[in-house]
Image (spheres, grey):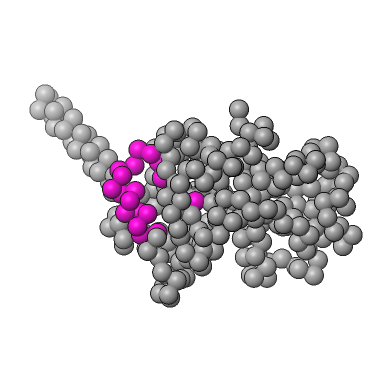
Amino acid sequence: MLKRTLALAVGLTLSFSALLAQAADTLKVSAIPDEAPTELLRKFKPLGEYLEQQLDMKVEFVPVSDYPAVVEALATDRIDMAWLGGFTFVQARLKTGNAIPLVQREQDAQFTSKFITADPAVKSLTDLKGKSFAFGSVSSTSGSLMPRYFMLQDGIKPETYFSRVGYSGAHDATVAWVQAGKVDAGVLNASVWEKLVTAGKVDTDKVKVFATTPAYYDYNWTVRGTLDPALANKIKVALLALDPAKPEQKAILDLQAASRFIETKPENYKGIEEAARAADLLK
């Protein structure tokens, strides 16, 4: 009986050790859900395969339900790396104290948001007073925080300026709301707008851009601070090495709406932290 008990204990220990080893050999990656889940998976698949080759380890995409879930997953070491918006990065950095931004796309140093409408009478935000308006997710940098910040600087408080403020939850959903007439106008990130237009997924005879925000820092690839520094560096090197001159790598970059990746640092997002505090989104 004792031998059987010992054998069972040893077996369970070995099985648990094997699971830990398997987990250690898998890079778990996620992203803020700023687009439909199927689109996020489609965009990530070739990049994941590239990272598997470069890192010699399995790479698994872990979808999340909302923006706070990404921050929580990084803070509790349930994921190793995530594609974050500038505001989500600030939240992750404040919550963990050590989240590390590795790289950003070139355009993320000069990112903008687009204000859109299907109402031909709307030429500026002034024409929207008393009308309905949609942001994306409340935690979105480009779909909520920065547009709100710039509106506040112009003396526009959305909750009193518009007749109704809604949150669509994602950039593509904001376009759908505006196109369907659910709201009079909305705002989304410039990259998603351009992608939807190129793909013919928005009727530009009906929906138009009527304003663009000033530039700000936005998206980046961030790793948890407790990740092995050698592995974090290998990930950074792999992302920086993506070359648009190589067709197979250009395809990966195109899916990320990137010309190439460049290094970034926490200091780049101080402006976003200040904007979040000014908008009472950080306590």
Q: Is residue 79 magenta?
A: no
- Res. 9 in view: yes
- The residue depicted at 19 percent of the width and 38 percent of the height is 14
Judging depth in this view, the residue of 94 and 47 nearest the camera is 94
Quadrant in which the N terminus appears: top left
Q: At which x and y percent is residue 79?
A: 41, 43
- Res. 62 in view: no
Quadrant in which the C terminus appears: top right
Judging depth in this view, the residue of 115 and 214 nearest the camera is 214
- The residue depicted at 66 percent of the width and 43 percent of the height is 145
Quadrant in which residue 243 is drawn: bottom left
Which segment did they paint magenta? 220-239
Q: Is residue 274 above or below residue 249?
A: above
- The residue depicted at 20 percent of the width and 34 percent of the height is 13
Quadrant in which residue 153 is drawn: top right
Q: At which x and y percent is residue 234?
A: 31, 54
Question: Looking at the image, which residue sits at the far top?
Answer: 2
Image check: 224 left or right of 16?
Answer: right
Quadrant in which residue 123 is drawn: bottom right
Q: At which x and y percent is residue 161?
A: 84, 41
Q: Is residue 228 magenta?
A: yes
Q: At which x and y percent is residue 268?
A: 52, 46
